[in-house]
Image (cartoon, grey):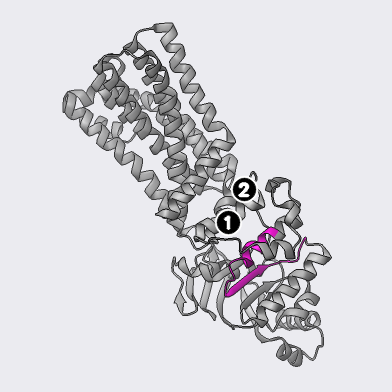
Amino acid sequence: MIKCVGLEKRFDKLYALRDVNISVAKGRVTAVVGPNGSGKSTLIKSILGLVTPSNGYITVDGIRLNGEWEYRRMIGYMPQIAYFPSNLSARDVFHMVKSLRGVMGSPETPHIEAFNLGPEMDKPSRVLSGGNRQKASAVIALMFQPDILIFDEPTAGLDPISSRQLKTIISEQRDAGKTVILTSHVMSELDELADDVIFLLEGRVEYAGAVHDLKKMTGEILLESAVAELMKRAVNE
Amino acid sequence: MKTALRIALFSVRDVLRSKWGILYMLFFFLATEGLFRLQGDTSQVTISLIGLSLILIPLTSIIFGTMYIYYSREFIELLVTQPVRRRTVFGGMYTGLTFSLITAFVVGVITPFVLRGAHTPAEWSTLALLLTAGSCLTTAFVGLSFYISLLSEDRGKGLGIAIFVWLATAVLYDGVIMIVAYAFASYPLETPMLILAMLNPIDMARVFLLIKVDMAALMGYTGAVFERFFGGSQGALVSIAVLLLWTVLPFWAGLRRFARKDF
C-alpha cells in the first residue's frame, strides 16, 4: 500500500503537485493519467524517492519516506526513457544492478527470453534501438520480483509484439498480488489493464478511484471518453 | 560501504575504458622522463615537476571531474532508482574517480624515478611530498568539480564554471594577492594574507611543498608570509592541514547537495 498525504512539490514557484492525497492499493493496477505536464512523472518519482516533496509525505508499506533507500528493494521501476551508460551492454547493466543488490544467479533469464532480448545482450547500449533499451529496462524492473512495479509510459517505443507481451506480464503481476502503477498516453491500453485511476490536472488530483466508478459517474463506456468528460468538467468549474 | 566500493570499481573501470586516465598517466610519465633527459639532476626535475603539477593537476581534475558527472548522468539515474543510499552513490563515484586520477599521477611520475634508481633519501622524500600534495590537490579539485556539476544541468555552463574556478585559483589569484598587497601596503597585512592563502588549495599546496624544499624564491608573496609567520616546519604543518581540509570540504558540500537533488 502506497499513501500520499498532502503531497506538494514546487520547482521554484511552479507547482508540479498540489495537495495530493491518494492511496494505491495492493493487487491492483493503478493508472496515473493526465495531460502533459500534469505531474504524473513527478508523482511517480516522489514515490521512488527521486524527487523530494516540498510538503506532505509518502508512506510505502507503512515506511515514511524521508531519504529512505532500503524500501526501493521492494520496487521495480521502468522509466519513461531508458538510458544506460553508453559503453555498457545490457549484460553489463544487469550484472551491475544485481551486484548492487547483492543478488546471485540469473533471475533475468526468463525475462530476457520473454522479450526475445538474447541476441541484443552484448551490444553496447549506445547502438541498441530505443525499443530494445526499453525491453532491457523492463527486465531490470521485473527481475527481482518486487512487490511494487512502477511503469512510466512502458509501451511507448515498443513493437506490437513486445507491447502485447508487456501487457500480459502486467496483468499476471497484478493477479499475483503485486501493486502496479502505470502511466500511459494510450487510453485504450489503460482500459484493458487499469483497475483504479488517478487523474491529475495541473498537479491536482481531479479523480482518484475505481475505473468502473468513474465510468458510471460520467456515463461513459470508454476510459478515454470518461477522462475527457472529467477534463471538460474540471475546465468548466 | 561494500556497495560504495562496488560503485567505485565501476567508476574505475569506466575511466580505464574511456582511456583518458591512461593518457593522463602517460602525460606525467613523458613529462618526468623528458625532464630527466633535459636536466638530468633529480632535485631540478622535482622542482620543475612541482611547478607543472600545481598548474596541471587542478586543471585536469576539475575538468575531468565535471565531465565525468555529466557523462555519467545515465549511470547515476539508474543507481538512484536502486536500493542504494544517495551518499553511497556519490561517495563511490568520488572515490573511484579520485583513486584513478591519483594512481595515474603517482604511477606516471614515479616510474621514471624508479627506472633511474640511485637517488638520495632527501630526493626521495621531496618526491614523496610532491606526490602527497598532488594527491591532495586531485582530491580537492575532484570534490570541487562534483559540486560544480551539481550547480547546473547545462554541461556548457558547468564546464565554464569549472574552467573559471581553475583560472581563478591557478592564475588570477596571485594577481589579486599582489594588488591587495600593493593597495594596502601601509596596513598590517599578515593576517589577511594568511587567510587569503588558506582560501586557495593551490596556494596551500605550493606553500607546503616550497617551505619543505626551501625554495623561498618560488614561494610567492603568500608563501613568504606563511614562512615568516609560522616558520619552516610549523608552516608546512599548517599548510598541509588546511590542504587536507580542502580535500574534504567541497566533497562534503557536494554530498549534501546530491542527497537533496531532484532527478
> Disc 1 residue type?
Leu
Question: Residue at 64% across / 75% down in the picture?
Answer: A181
Residue at disc 1, secondary structure:
helix
Residue on which disc 1 sits: B78
Do dots 2 and 1 share one subunit? no
The image quarter in which residue A18 lies = bottom right
Given residues B153 and B234, the one toward you in this image is B234
> Disc 2 residue type?
Pro
Question: Residue at 55% across / 32% down in the picture?
Answer: B20
Q: Is residue A185 visible?
A: no
- A5 left or right of A27 in image: left
Name above or below for residue B215 compared with residue B179. Answer: above
Given residues A96 and B20, the one toward you in this image is A96
How far from the left and from the top, in percent, is residue B212?
A: 24, 22
The residues colored magenta run A136-157
Which image quarter is the N terminus of chain A in?
bottom right
Name above or below for residue B184 compared with residue A164. Answer: above
Residue on which disc 2 sits: A85
Question: Residue at 71% across / 78% down in the picture?
Answer: A171
Residue at disc 2, secondary structure:
loop
How far from the left and from the top, in percent, is residue A169?
A: 71, 73
